[in-house]
């Protein structure tokens, strides 16, 4: 596609339910990032994929959060047993490969429109 | 660990020049980025610095001093549409080239 897409754009769920957020990166981008942004706050790094593997999962807030990426393309972020503090905009970004398929020199990240999650 | 500091808010007048500062601490510096984010929208890339000095791109310029852990974004000839948050982000080669974002500086441009 032309840009990074995310679905759904909005998700309202009840506390305790599981949610799945989807990200379709720009075609050919091997690096994929998930961030969380609470109202009026900066971006909080969650997880980074290079291909299908996640070299850095250090940002995941708890074991209720998990993410996977298949085929080097689509990624899903799953939040189990959602809590009210999980309410935020979840942003996905992708970047193009550099030499040897690793992160590019500039690693310019192209962001999707985000999924606004509201946990009641 | 990593730490990025930038002012929370700034106000400037249309047509003026504004400088947004960013200081950072990181163990494996591998580039500094500035992103612009309008309210309710995703961030968009503005600039990238990896070597010391000034990078100019139209009305926007970005400066980096690696020895001081310091960068600034300079916006000239301010326009009302420049009202947005400006995010400083640092790429860290440790842990697989993670990018850490600052909390952002909200810029208000007034007439």
Image (cartoon, rainbow, N blue to C red):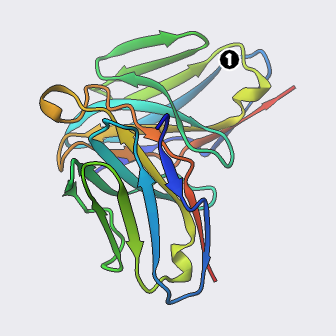
Q: Position of residue B85 (x, y in %)?
A: 62, 40
Q: Residue at x 19, y 40 (%)?
A: B93
Dot 1 falls on a residue whose secondary structure is loop
Residue A47 in the image: above or below residue A61: above
Q: Residue at x 26, y 62 (%)?
A: A58
Residue B14 in the image: above or below residue A11: above
Closer to the camera in the image, A99 or A83: A99
Q: Residue at x 48, y 42 (%)?
A: A111
Q: Which residue is mark 1?
A: B17
Closer to the camera in the image, A52 or B61: A52
Judge from the rendering whether residue A99 lies leftward or rightward of residue B25; answer left or right.
left
The quarter of the displayed image where residue B43 is located: top right
Q: Chain of mark 1?
A: B
Judge from the rendering whether residue A55 lies leftward or rightward of residue B34; answer left or right.
left
Judge from the rendering whether residue A82 lies leftward or rightward of residue A106; answer left or right.
right
Q: Position of residue A33 (x, y in %)?
A: 36, 50
Residue situated furthest left in the rendering: A100
Q: Residues within 10 Å of mark 1 (few under 14, many from 20)?
A: some
Q: Position of residue A4 (x, y in %)?
A: 47, 43
Closer to the camera in the image, A60 or A73: A73
Q: Position of residue B103 (x, y in %)?
A: 51, 49
The quarter of the image holding the C terminus of chain A is bottom right
Residue situated furthest right in the rendering: B111
The quarter of the displayed image where residue B11 is located: top right
């Amino acid at each position: 596609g032309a840009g990074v897409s995310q679905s759904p754009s909005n998700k309202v769920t009840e506390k305790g339910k599981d949610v799945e957020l989807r990200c379709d990166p720009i075609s050919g981008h091997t690096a994929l990032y998930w961030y969380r942004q609470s109202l009026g706050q900066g971006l909080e790094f969650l997880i980074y994929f290079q291909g299908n593997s996640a070299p850095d999962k250090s940002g995941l807030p708890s074991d209720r959060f998990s993410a996977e990426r298949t085929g080097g393309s689509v990624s899903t972020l799953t939040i189990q047993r959602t809590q009210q503090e999980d309410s935020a905009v979840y942003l996905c970004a992708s970047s193009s490969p550099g030499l040897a398929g690793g992160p590019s020199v500039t690693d310019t990240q192209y962001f999707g429109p985000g999924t606004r999650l509201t946990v009641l | 660990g990593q730490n990025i500091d930038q002012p929370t808010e700034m106000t400037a007048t249309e047509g003026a020049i504004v400088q947004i500062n960013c200081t950072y601490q990181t163990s494996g510096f591998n580039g500094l980025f500035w992103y612009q984010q309008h309210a309710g929208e995703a961030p968009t890339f503005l600039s990238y610095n990896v070597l010391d000095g000034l990078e100019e791109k139209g009305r926007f310029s970005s400066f980096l001093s690696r020895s001081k852990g310091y960068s600034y974004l300079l916006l000239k000839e301010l326009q009302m549409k420049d009202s947005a948050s400006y995010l400083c982000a640092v790429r860290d080669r440790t842990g697989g080239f993670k990018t850490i974002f600052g909390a952002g500086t909200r810029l208000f441009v007034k007439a």
